[in-house]
Image (spheres, rainbow, N blue to C red):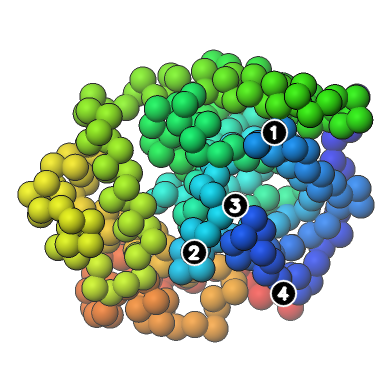
Amino acid sequence: MRQGIEMAAVRQVVPPTIYSAQIHGETTHIEIYSRVTDPVLRSTALGAMEMIRMRCGAVAIKRHAAEIKGRAPRMLTFILQVRGRGSFSHYGNQIALDEGDITLCDNNSQYELRQEGPGETILFRVPAGMVRDAIPTPDFLCGRRLAGHDGLASTALAMAIDLAGKDDSRLDAAMRERAGRHLLDVLASAFVPMLDERTSASAIMSGRYWKVKLFIEQHLRDPQLSPSLIARKLHLSDRYLRMIFAVSDEAPSAYILRRRLEECARHLRDPRWRSHSITDIAFSWGFNSAPHFARSFRARFHCSPRDYRQQRLPQPPG
């Protein structure tokens, strides 16, 4: 019987422990805000796949676009929220994760995964080619939430929990790999309803859209980023770029502006950025005009950046 995580078993970490590590060949930043008395970090090899079971307190795991070198083979990670609540920012999406929810992460792209308090998460890392064999357009699913009560999500979660709890010595390598492939098949089936909701655009056009979107996410801080620059760097015409973005309801320039505003808002409500001015934050995300930023921010969030920060930024203790 799996035991729940009691709040009494949590110890706050003040100030937070912050460090960087090389994980699978890429720089990953880890911020620890609280600890549990019975933490677990356990990895199980499933052939070319890997399952990581993580029980911990409040933690943030981040990978920044500027530090991603693409040296390691591309992996996609299914994130399964077993207990507690979390959040995930990836591919321009920002989602909350409740118990039972599942999402997908491209490890070669910028992301931020947070465990908001004591909880447990299973990370199922799979080579991108294997995922594409099971899910033709996995990029569409990155950073999108599959609710735990939808379709086969609960079945996939139960399988992952059972597999993560197995004693490695009782399963040989071939059996572990078969179990991993079976779990991948169930996860792919669980995501089918979400894939059915996609636009009817061709698979080729949809794939190019996600390639463009990933390029934007990786260069969001560049003040020179524009539809013309994107088209030039990806060897596309401006007209074809607009056609690619027709699979969404946003023009490329509108998407760039929205994502920059969302990242600025995230920093404005983050205590770690308290010492940075609003202008510093805006310019760090590619804005080069304070008045333009202020007008755009008000249009999206219906208040000034200063008021937003005062309303959302936690007050320092004492």
Q: Earlier in the sequence, mark 2 or mark 3?
A: 2
Q: Is residue 97 above or below residue 183?
A: below
Q: Earlier in the sequence, mark 3 or mark 4?
A: 3
What amino acid type is highlighted by mark number 4?
A: Pro
Picture residue at 35% right of the left edge, 65% below the top: 219
What amino acid type is highlighted by mark number 2?
A: Lys
**Which residue was labeled with disc 1?**
47
Q: Is there CB contact under 8 Å for labels 3 and 4?
A: no
Q: Is residue 263 above or below residue 8?
A: below
Left or right, 44 with respect to 208, comes to: right
**Which residue was labeled with disc 3?**
113
> Marks 4 and 1, Cα distance to the nearest angstrom?
48 Å
Picture residue at 73% right of the left edge, 42% below the top: 52
Q: Nearer the viewer, mark 4 or mark 1?
A: 1
Left or right, 293 with respect to 315, comes to: left
Q: Is there CB contact under 8 Å for labels 3 and 1?
A: no
What amino acid type is highlighted by mark number 1?
A: Gly
- Quarter holding residue 220: bottom left
> Marks 3 and 1, Cα distance to the nearest angstrom?
25 Å
Quadrant location of the C terminus? bottom right
> Marks 3 and 4, Cα distance to the nearest angstrom?
25 Å
> Marks 4 and 2, Cα distance to the nearest angstrom?
39 Å
